[in-house]
Amino acid sequence: MRDDAQLEVLSVDECRRLLAEALVGWLAFCDGDRPALAPVNYIVHLGEIVARSDYGAKLAAAAHDRLMSLGVGGIDAQTRTGWSVQVTGRARLLGDDLVNPDLPEPDSWAVDGPGVRIGIPIEEISGRRVVRAG
């Protein structure tokens, strides 16, 4: 890290604020015996990350109550500053509107059709920011 850079640990409140403002995050999960990352659109609802998934590895991991992490961030390449927030929780299937009629529907850039909603309770949250002196 350059001499004028400082690494700042973000408060839980600041992490939650940034998490709620981001549109896309990277979802980390186990696909069999291999780690996997997938970009997802999501919303934060009642202390939980809500995303939609087609049938596949993400949905299978959620159906088996696996730990998942979601990472979001923002960077400014010109000033070499930025921030990141990571959330970890045990994923679960949230079902459709018959099961959870009041659950908001997250937008999805990649899932065609309704997909299946998965939830990741915010069990752990942490974040960092790189700032410049002055």
Image (tube, rainbow, N blue to C red):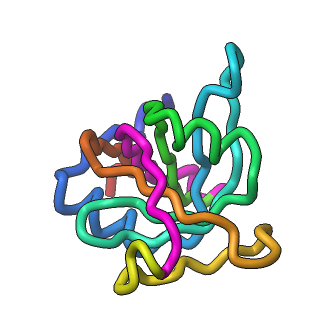
Front residue of 11 and 87: 87
Asked if residue 18 is positioned above or below residue 81 in the image, the reply reads below
Asked if residue 73 is positioned above or below residue 58 in the image, the reply reads below
- Residue plotted at (50% across, 47% down): 71
Quadrant of the image for the C terminus?
Answer: bottom left
Whole-percent x and y of residue 25? 58, 57
Type of secondary structure dominating the magenta stretch: strand
Whether the magenta-drawn stretch holds residue 96 is answered as yes
Whether the magenta-drawn stretch holds residue 90 is answered as yes
Task: Name the outermost residue toward the front.
Answer: 98
Find the magenta span and give its range: 77-97
Whole-percent x and y of residue 126? 29, 42
- Is residue 16 something that shows in the picture? yes
Whole-percent x and y of residue 61? 58, 36
Apparent side of residue 115 relative to residue 87 in the rendered image (left or right): right
- Residue plotted at (47% across, 31% down): 66
Asked if residue 131 is positioned above or below residue 19 in the image, the reply reads above
Front residue of 125 and 55: 55
Apparent side of residue 65 relative to residue 124 in the rendered image (left or right): right
